[in-house]
């Protein structure tokens, strides 16, 4: 008997999970994902970022825990706490440990399925415990939540799904906190949310501040005293949950302010981005295009059924007007955030998101679905005739309006409007029925959600499994062949990459990185040295011979052209940038994918520099990559006479083909205009520069910061010239080496009708003087005797009575450093990008150890949270006795 009762309790959950699984499998089959087709689920950031982080996750927990807090596989080195707290602390990620490295593509599919299924079940639990509605209707609302447009369009940001998993439980437990004073469920669920993904947790916390008011007004009767008492309890419990999560939350915030948030502000503006009519245009099935995830209105569709029942909620006389008023106010709060820039930035933590706009809009959909549930429950037997007429009229009027406005909304197609209208009228008809209504509604909803999901997902390009597997296997095999059996520190650079995070995937010390937690010191350093950088990425492909040595690059890999036989197996990966100077390095044995070169002249992780490095005047200058590299060379060549290693060489005035100069300003700032009027033609004229290379020295071109590969392409001597893009400061690229007495033509071929830029400049590098310097420094190189990512021991011989050791790693005060067993303090240098320590003449042992102090402070906050929880529980028990 007890087992029968137990089965009756879990049967609805089994039914819900089974129907979700069926719909997910159908979608997977349609999209040809593994195992139904050749595609993985990897697309955009999931394939270019997160898959590499998952590889790092496995490696750290299973094989190499020394890179838990710091890793040289992140850019030129960086703290990892921020990356863990933003990307990797989901409890669901333990699933990844069940798969091998070469099975990560399949692991991502399983991980996505598990998160979405649990998300469905938590919402189903919410509907059963709070609203006690029919099982099939509960499944309908749960699937509407799981397969809303937001989830389908953004589930590639797999770490955000944790917020959607915990949100229904938070809503349920907050309801219990307010109505029954039960604390534990809400407190611990909010704590888990903050730990698993603080970013989405921040948005949920803002929502809960409004939602708690709605729940209080939702009660039949509430006095002003009860209102303040309940809201105070909500605030107190939320604060304790925040403190409990402090062990990860505080380090996350600390890391955030060291990365992309560094130096940003939140100006108060009233900039209008979208009108309500633009936002409501997303309330149609399949109203999506690829541009919407770059910069568009929020994804709000969760099925036309939800839209209809939300209207019925506001029409119902069964629901008190005070509750509807608060619900309307909360929806208006969301609407204002969709319309105006400033409130949207508040929801996003003070930042404008890069891609994936309105990341908080799932909260709007969640609240709309809850209103729809209440709207459904307010229907007595069947939809009344006035409600039927009103909803039909409104649905038809909206459809007709947007039908006429389709040219203004590329994401709206005739099919999307007709499908929404047809399904909407069918839903209204079914709501007029009395028998078997629940099951018919569920079937129609499944069709609605399935069509919408497929229409969204078909806009993405998915990584083919075979090409992914061949590429990652070749990459891992290549890296394993470089495994040296000593403790020497060096970096590896591949002048081609499927992603910018391949060092984390294949577990080697690289220079490239792309994440929201990348230190701003690293990106700024790259920009100053003429290397490509963005706010969240570094991309080392066009380094000079000097920067190769400066960053201790031992192996450089150039991509090989693919044979016809291999073209179907491997990714067609172009070089990041042209690298004529890399041919100076010793070539190693090739494999089918890469041509590796070895650099024997490296400066090491630490190098002796002039004490002038700590002078206030010793600073990098923006958009002066040659001058900034010269500054480093003078600091390293402290015994030299200061003669420049780079010499600027003449570059001809621009010679124009089908292009006119419309304006030339002071400093050589040009405005070019294409004379080609054909809008279909890609090449819109060219700007040509002539130059000569008189010696066999390397020559580098300083490209202006205003260009990128969307604005122009380049040819050098009538052959394609590849340069890295995008970049924020002037970029230094190799244009010639070992080409004495040769004339060249550089052609900048416009891809846009107009272009504004400063002129490029040409520079010759004195390789003979530089090689003399490197030969001298070879005997003084920092020798690593013991290396792990968080603990480094080495020896060095220095020449100056009082000098400094410069470290090619971003400044971080969490390093503890001793010189000959005496503690020293590292100081930030060169615009706070790198760090240096004082050193005297002689032989020295350097010991470096890393541990983030924010962990200590975060742990203290969590302990305060435990104390607060104990006090809260005691007060609750006392109130019960009273």
Image (cartoon, grey):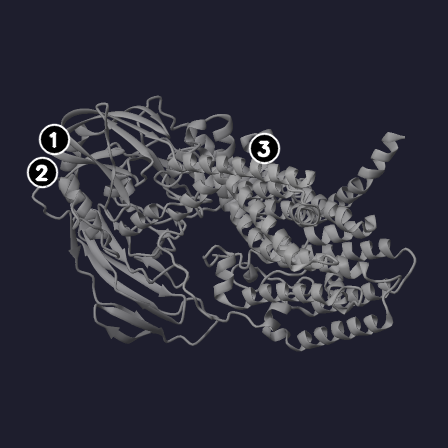
Helix, strand or loop status at disc 2 = loop
Residue topped by disc 1: 799
The crowd level at tag 1 (other Cα within 10 Å; few <14, some 14-19, many 20+) is some
Q: Residue at x 17, y 60 (%)?
A: 650
Q: CA distance from mark 3 to mark 1?
A: 51 Å
Pick out the residue farthest to the left.
641
Q: Nearer the viewer, residue 563 or 764?
A: 764
Q: Percent from the top left, x then y, of residue 505?
A: 47, 36
**Which quadrant is the N terminus positioned in?**
top right
- Report whether 194 appears left or right of 72: right
Q: Nearer the viewer, residue 261 or 374?
A: 374
If you read the primary sequence from the N terminus, does the residue marked by circle 2 or circle 1 appear first? 2
Q: Is residue 340 visible?
A: yes
Q: CA distance from mark 2 to mark 3?
A: 55 Å
Q: Percent from the top left, x then y, of residue 468?
A: 54, 40
- Report whether 495 appears left or right of 125: left
If you read the primary sequence from the N terminus, does the residue marked by circle 3 or circle 1 appear first? 3
368 relative to 700, above or below: below
What label does residue 639 carry, if any?
2
Residue topped by disc 3: 94
Helix, strand or loop status at disc 1 = strand
Camera-nearest label, 2 or 3: 3
Q: Are marks 2 and 1 in contact (CB under 8 Å)?
A: yes
Q: Is residue 602 visible?
A: no
């Amino acid at each position: 008997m007890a087992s029968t009762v137990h089965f009756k309790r879990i049967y609805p959950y089994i039914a819900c999970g089974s129907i979700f699984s069926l719909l997910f499998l159908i979608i997977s089959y349609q999209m040809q994902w593994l195992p139904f087709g050749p595609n993985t689920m990897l697309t955009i950031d999931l394939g270019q970022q997160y898959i590499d982080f998952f590889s790092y996750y496995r490696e750290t927990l299973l094989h190499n825990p020394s890179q838990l807090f710091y890793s040289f596989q992140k850019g030129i080195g960086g703290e990892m706490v921020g990356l863990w707290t933003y990307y990797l602390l989901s409890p669901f990620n333990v699933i990844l440990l069940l798969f091998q490295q070469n099975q990560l593509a399949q692991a991502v599919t399983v991980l996505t399925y598990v998160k979405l299924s649990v998300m469905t079940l938590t919402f189903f639990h919410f509907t059963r415990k709070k609203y006690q509605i029919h099982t099939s209707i509960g499944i309908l609302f749960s699937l509407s939540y799981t397969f809303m447009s937001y989830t389908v369009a953004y589930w590639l940001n797999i770490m955000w799904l944790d917020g959607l998993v915990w949100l229904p439980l938070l809503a349920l437990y907050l309801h219990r906190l307010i109505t029954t004073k039960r604390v534990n469920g809400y407190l611990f669920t909010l704590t888990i949310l903050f730990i698993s993904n603080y970013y989405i947790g921040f948005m949920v916390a803002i929502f809960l501040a409004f939602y708690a008011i709605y729940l209080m007004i939702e009660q039949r009767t509430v006095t002003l005293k009860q209102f303040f008492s309940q809201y105070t309890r909500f605030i107190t419990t939320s604060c304790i949950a925040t403190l409990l999560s402090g062990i990860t939350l505080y380090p996350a915030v600390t890391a955030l302010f060291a990365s992309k948030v560094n130096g940003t502000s939140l100006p108060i503006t009233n900039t209008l981005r979208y009108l309500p009519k633009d936002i409501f245009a997303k309330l149609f099935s399949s109203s999506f295009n690829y541009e919407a995830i770059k910069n568009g209105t929020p994804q709000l569709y969760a099925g036309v059924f939800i839209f209809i029942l939300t209207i019925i909620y506001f029409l119902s006389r069964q629901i008190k007007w005070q509750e509807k008023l608060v619900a309307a106010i909360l929806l208006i709060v969301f609407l204002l955030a969709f319309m105006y820039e400033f409130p949207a930035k508040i929801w996003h933590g003070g930042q404008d998101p890069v891609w994936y706009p309105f990341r908080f809009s799932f909260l709007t959909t969640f609240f709309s679905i809850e209103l729809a549930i209440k709207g459904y429950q307010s229907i007595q037997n069947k939809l009344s005739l006035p409600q039927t007429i009103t909803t039909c009229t409104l649905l038809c009027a909206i459809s007709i309006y947007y039908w006429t406005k389709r040219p203004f909304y590329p994401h709206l197609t005739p099919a999307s409007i007709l499908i929404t209208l047809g399904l909407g009228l069918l839903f209204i008809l079914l709501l007029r029925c009395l028998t078997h209504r629940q099951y018919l509604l569920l079937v129609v909803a499944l069709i609605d959600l399935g069509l919408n999901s497929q229409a969204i997902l078909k806009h993405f390009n998915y990584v083919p499994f075979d090409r992914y597997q061949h590429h990652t296997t070749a990459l891992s095999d290549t890296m394993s062949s470089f495994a040296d059996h000593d403790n020497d520190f060096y970096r590896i650079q591949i002048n081609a990459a499927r992603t910018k995070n391949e060092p984390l995937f294949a577990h080697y010390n690289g220079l490239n990185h792309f994440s929201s937690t990348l230190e701003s010191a690293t990106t700024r350093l790259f920009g100053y040295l003429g290397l490509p950088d963005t706010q969240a990425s570094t991309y080392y492909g066009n380094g000079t011979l000097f920067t190769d040595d400066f960053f201790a690059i031992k192996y450089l890999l150039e991509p090989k052209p693919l044979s016809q036989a291999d073209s179907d197996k491997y990714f067609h990966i172009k070089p990041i940038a042209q690298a004529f100077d890399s041919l100076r390095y010793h070539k190693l044995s090739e494999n089918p994918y890469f041509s590796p070169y070895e650099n024997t002249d490296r400066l090491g992780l630490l190098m002796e520099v002039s004490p002038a490095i700590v002078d206030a005047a010793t600073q990098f200058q923006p958009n002066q990559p040659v001058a900034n590299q010269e500054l480093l060379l003078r600091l390293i060549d402290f015994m030299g006479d200061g003669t420049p290693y780079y010499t600027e060489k003449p570059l001809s005035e621009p010679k124009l083909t089908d292009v006119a100069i419309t304006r030339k300003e002071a400093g050589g700032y040009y405005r070019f205009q294409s004379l080609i009027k054909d809008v279909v033609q890609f090449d819109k004229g060219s700007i040509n520069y002539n130059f000569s290379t008189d010696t066999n020295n390397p020559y580098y071109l300083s490209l202006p910061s205003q260009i990128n590969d969307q604005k122009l392409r380049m040819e050098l001597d009538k052959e394609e010239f590849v340069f890295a893009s995008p970049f924020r400061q002037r970029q230094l690229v190799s244009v010639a080496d070992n080409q004495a007495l040769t004339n060249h033509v550089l052609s900048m071929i416009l891809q846009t009708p107009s272009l504004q830029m400063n002129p490029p400049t040409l520079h010759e590098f004195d390789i003979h003087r530089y090689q003399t310097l490197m030969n001298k420094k070879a005997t003084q190189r920092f020798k690593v005797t013991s290396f792990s990512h968080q603990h480094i021991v080495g020896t060095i011989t220095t020449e100056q009575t009082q000098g400094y050791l410069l470290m090619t790693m971003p400044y971080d005060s969490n390093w503890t450093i001793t010189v000959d067993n005496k503690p020293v303090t590292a100081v930030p240098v060169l615009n706070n990008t790198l760090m240096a320590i004082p050193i005297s003449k002689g032989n020295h042992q350097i010991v470096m150890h890393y541990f983030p102090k924010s962990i200590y402070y975060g742990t203290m906050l969590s302990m305060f949270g435990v104390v607060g929880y104990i006090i809260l529980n005691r007060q609750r028990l006392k109130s019960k006795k009273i």
